[in-house]
Amino acid sequence: MTGRTITEKIIAAHCAEPDGVRAGAIVTARPDVVLLNDVSGPLAFTQFDAMGATRPFDPARIVLVADHFAPAPDIVAAGAIALTRDFAKRHAIPHFYEPGRGGIEHTLLAELGMIGHGGIVFGADSHTCTAGAFNALGIGFGSTDLAAALALGQLWLRVPDSIRVVLSGTPGPYVTGKDIILDLIRRMGSDGAADASLEFGGPGLRHLPVDARMAIANMAVEAGADTCVFAGDDLSAADMVRRGMAPVAAVVPDADAVYRAVIEVDLDRLSPIVACPPSPAAGVPVEQLRGQKVDQVYVGNCSNGTLTDLRQVADILRGRRVAPGVRMLVVPATQKIWRAALAEGLLDILAEAGAAISTPTCGACFGGHMGILAAGETAIATTNRNYRGRMGHPDSQVFLANAWVAAAAAVAGEIVPPGEIAARVATEDAA
Amino acid sequence: MSLHIEGRIHRFGDEVNTDVILPGRYLTLRTPEELGRHCLEGLDPGFVDRVAPGDIIAAGRNFGCGSSREHAVIALKAVGVAAIVVESAARIFFRNAVNLGLPVLVCPDAARALAAGEPARIDLDRMAISQGARLWPVQPLGAEVRAILTAGGLVPRVRQALGA
């Protein structure tokens, strides 16, 4: 019998019959936590009732977050949040979060200390795979599946194949987690990781703090992956402790685990990548897009709304101004990140430069509210999807990039390698 | 879900994502009637006027990729789409469709060959798709998927499990 991948080990630890957990097997797994939001939740609650369920499997392991249409932009959205709030109240679910106390669900879940080494979260959101950053499995589902998970505390799934991604080398200036994943998606294609879990490991991991890992894990689904997971290490262990979790052993793959493929990534050779509309798989080096005008710059979302991202933006914007004719929206991913950015003075740097800073929300990332694009407009965003009409009108377009590149575009009014803005004396831009 | 489906083919390409099936700005809507009005609006605003109950979608690779929004499946069902034949489907969309009783058949040969505007038949008993004189066998559904579809979706299946 050959060894196991990280994915197989974690799923096996959540199954009644762990021996049968091998890639391709159909198994029933019990998650540590289930996660729903104000868009996926209300549909799930209706299905939960229709299933004849009267109480959820374990109220303490359910997390409900109002983040998509929050703060509510209209009466219908307010009603959806009210349904979510009511479900929490009716079933005595302690983990219900609204603006002012929460944030974007995937970033918030980690912050709450509810996911760490070896854990599994089932979420009614495709970006639940963000949890892979923490040596855990996040698996996205729709509302009816999550209704069943709420009722039964378990779901069937096919154990994914694993694709090992070996990171080596050291990332150069302005190369971030975003560039690593945009490069990988470009190489694999938007369904290259279908039916698979991307397992990240290798000596390059030590250069990737958990914020960078979140940016990578978040977009595994954009390569078609079922889920993803980083090998646990000292960094992920320290992160668990920082988030108030009891340290448990990291899950590592067996030496003779079987992979569908092994992909080598040399971090030394990477440069900032920008994904062109309308596909996250359409990445090109930033130099190739030099001069592409932008109307809106958006920094935020569950992949890149972290304190790390806000520091990168502040580095570029300090002493500089957002270009005339460009609007810049900055959306810290959680209330805690917002406050930390305030305490560090980052928000003032951004505001002085002419950026609008919002409360945490999924907002315009998915074309909901708080920054929708008009026909013919172009945005550069640190978000994770740039499909046709994603942020607004079907004839608007979105380029995906890291926070350095987005901030540089805000200053220049067009896409430009961030090093070129950083090399200029700040006061010249501010003058 | 009917085991015998007959309807006209509507053709789409690769990567029909759930954002174009049901754009994000409509995600506060929840009823089939409201969601159906915007079905595929991001890609083909005229689709809702052309589609008839029982019709079948044929499309390329990675159908339903992107967001997990079940609203996309609700919208497709609301306008009467009875089945989807694809080269490949994204995992979450596939599950959502099955859970709501909408069969998604992965059959690359049929997905590429089915002629738009012409009627086609799907026989889920014999797992075959046909159009005119042409016939394509379809890979058998997995046991769990078949059980959910046969039960009429995941809601009745969980009802059984709960003895509700």
Image (cartoon, coloured by chain):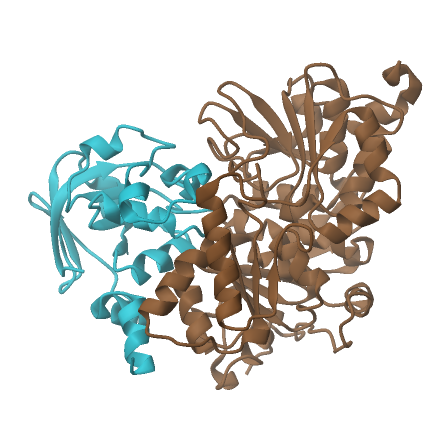
Chain colours: A brown, B cyan
Q: How many marks?
A: 0
Residue A50 to residue B67: above or below: below
Q: Is residue B107 left or right of residue A402?
A: left
Observer-nearest of A193 and B156:
B156
Residue A10 at least partly seen: yes
Residue A156 at least partly seen: no
Q: Is residue A6 left or right of residue B86?
A: right
Position in image of residue B28 (x %, y %): 43, 45
Observer-nearest of A124 and A129:
A124
Q: Quadrant of residue B148?
A: bottom left
Q: Is residue A215 left or right of residue B158?
A: right
Q: Is residue A343 left or right of residue A80?
A: right
Q: Residue at x 64, y 41 (%)?
A: A183
Position in image of residue A111 (x %, y %): 72, 61
Q: Quadrant of the N terminus of chain A?
A: bottom right
Q: Quadrant of the C terminus of chain A?
A: top right
Residue A291 to residue A179: above or below: above
Position in image of residue B64 (x %, y %): 39, 47
Residue A312 to residue A417: above or below: below
Observer-nearest of B67 and A268:
B67
Q: Residue at x 29, y 37 (%)?
A: B37
Position in image of residue B90 (x %, y %): 41, 52
Q: Residue at x 50, y 44 (%)?
A: A190
Observer-nearest of A188 and B18:
B18
